[in-house]
Image (cartoon, grey):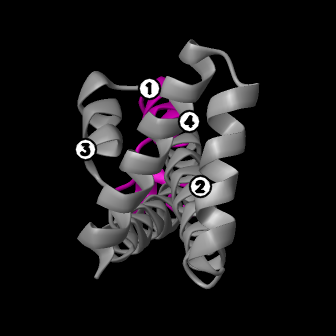
Amino acid sequence: MRQSFMNRLLETHDKASLIAWMNELDQEKRAIKQAMRRYSSETPENGGLSGSQRYSKLRRMKDRLEHLKEEREAVRLKLGKLKRQQKSLNKATNRKIVFCQAFVAAAEIELSPDQYLQLELKAMEMLTNHKANE
């Protein structure tokens, strides 16, 4: 995938932007499919392409369509990850404070310092994403 796509994917953290992005990708896919149908049905007599020009044009369109499918899937996976994080955060915030404090204490005791740090960073990331989506 393109570097610009990956950068945008890493920088996008709100649900609405991801959904809008998926809609843009879907719109572009529909436009390409429509153009492919048009090129496939046109004949040289109608002003359409023929031979290798037609084949290369359709091949480029098909390749672009495959890239769009991969990009959409990556955006969909990121959206699913955000939804799972939001669900977990909602679940945690609805628990009693005493349980949350006990959970943190148990994690600090049971996990290695590196694992605990990773867990703490993940929690910070989830809170940041939650605040961005409000």
The residue at 62%/64% (across/down) is 100
Return the mark for residue 67: none
Q: As shown in the figure, which amino acid type bears the numbered disc 1? A: Met
Residue tagged 1:
1
Q: Earlier in the sequence, mark 3 or mark 2?
A: 3
Residue at 67 percent across and 56 percent down: it is 102
Residue 87 image position (x, y, % from top left): 63, 73
Circles 4, 1 touching at the beta carbon (< 8 Å): no
**Amino acid type assigned to the residue bearing label 3 in the image:** Glu
Categorize mark 4 by other alpha carbons within 10 Å: few (<14), some (14-19), many (20+). some
State the CA–CA distance, disc 3 to disc 2.
14 Å
- Give the residues drawn in magenta, as a range: 40-63
**Amino acid at the residue labelled 2:** Lys
Q: Which of marks 2 and 1 is nearer the N terminus?
A: 1
* Picture coordinates of residue 101, whole percent (x, y): 58, 59
Q: In this view, does 49 lie above or below 14?
A: above
Image location (x, y in percent) of residue 104:
60, 48
Q: Is the magenta stretch mostly helix, strand or loop?
A: helix
Which sits earlier in the primary sequence, circle 3 or circle 1?
A: 1
Quadrant where the C terminus sits is bottom left
Whether residue 10 is visible, yes or no, is yes
Up-down relation of residue 43 to residue 56 (above or below): below
